[in-house]
Amino acid sequence: GLLSSGCDVVDLGILPTPGVQYGVRKYYDGGVMITASHNPKEYNGFKMSYNGIHNMFGKDVSDLYYVIINGIYSEGNGMIEYADIKEDYVKMIHNHIDMGNNKLKVVYDCGNGTTSIVAHDIFKSNEYIEYIPIFDESDGTFPNHHPDPAVEENLKQLKEKVLEVKADCGIAFDGDGDRVGVVDNQGNMIPIDKFMIIICVQLFRLLLFG
């Protein structure tokens, strides 16, 4: 459909949603992530961005609906090419992590989602993190548990592993890798709202003090 409207398309292959967003912001004019996020495997959908800042929402979606319903399409012959930005994306994340001299033992649970493609490379690039992965093979049937880390039941295996290996914390990703759930060293889930308070405090410090 994009090609027939005259758009040139770059196929990035399989990546987590933040990887696609990184590609859009750095290299391209817009992007489409094909994903159902944390929904059951029977579903699918699109996350779309055309301004390099945020995904479409609200009026953006209703405007697109109007275009679709009324068939307001351009015609042309677009070109398609294939690109691999995984290494560049992993390097960018590595360059933005400063652990100081703090060492952590971390269990991470990909939930068989697309973070499986990049998580190992990200964690191994940091000498201060000892990491133990679980369910880190991408499998869209989600054979081990539903990939929604906001639901505590889905963190059962992560909690058990954190306690087993005496880790400092556990991190679980959702199906397309743009949300996380966090477990502390005692196997307790940290509620998302409380976790976001921790993140926001750090962001405000960066904004105020650099």
Image (tube, rainbow, N blue to C red):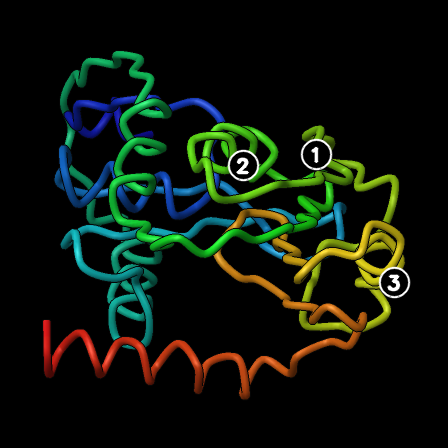
Quadrant containing the C terminus in the rendered view? bottom left
At label 2, which amino acid type do we have?
Answer: Ala
Whichever of labels 1 and 2 marks the residue nearer the N terminus, that label is 2
Residue identifier under label 3: 156
Classed neighbour count for the residue bearing mark 1: other residues with Cα under 10 Å, few (<14), some (14–19), many (≥20):
many
Residue identifier under label 1: 136
Residue depicted at 56% across the width and 31% down the height? 120
Nearer-the-camera pick, 160 or 156? 160
Numbered disc 2: secondary structure: helix
Residue depicted at 10% across the width and 79% down the height? 209
Numbered disc 1: secondary structure: loop
Query: Residue 24 is drawn in which quadrant?
Result: top left
Nearer-the-camera pick, 180 or 158? 158
Seen in the picture, residue 59 relative to 71 is either above or below; the reply is below
Seen in the picture, residue 3 relative to 27 is either above or below; the reply is above
Place of residue 142 in the rendered image (x, y in percent of width and height, measured from the top left)? 80, 42
Nearer-the-camera pick, 114 or 126? 126
Please say if the residues under marks 3 and 1 sit with CB atoms less than 8 Å apart: no
Structural distance between the alpha carbons of marks 2 and 3:
20 Å
Residue identifier under label 2: 119
Whichever of labels 3 and 1 marks the residue nearer the N terminus, that label is 1
At label 1, which amino acid type do we have?
Answer: Asp
| Left or right of residue 182: residue 140 | right
Place of residue 70 in the rendered image (x, y in percent of width and height, measured from the top left)? 28, 56
Please say if the residues under marks 1 and 2 sit with CB atoms less than 8 Å apart: yes
Structural distance between the alpha carbons of marks 3 and 1:
16 Å
Q: Residue furthest front?
A: 101
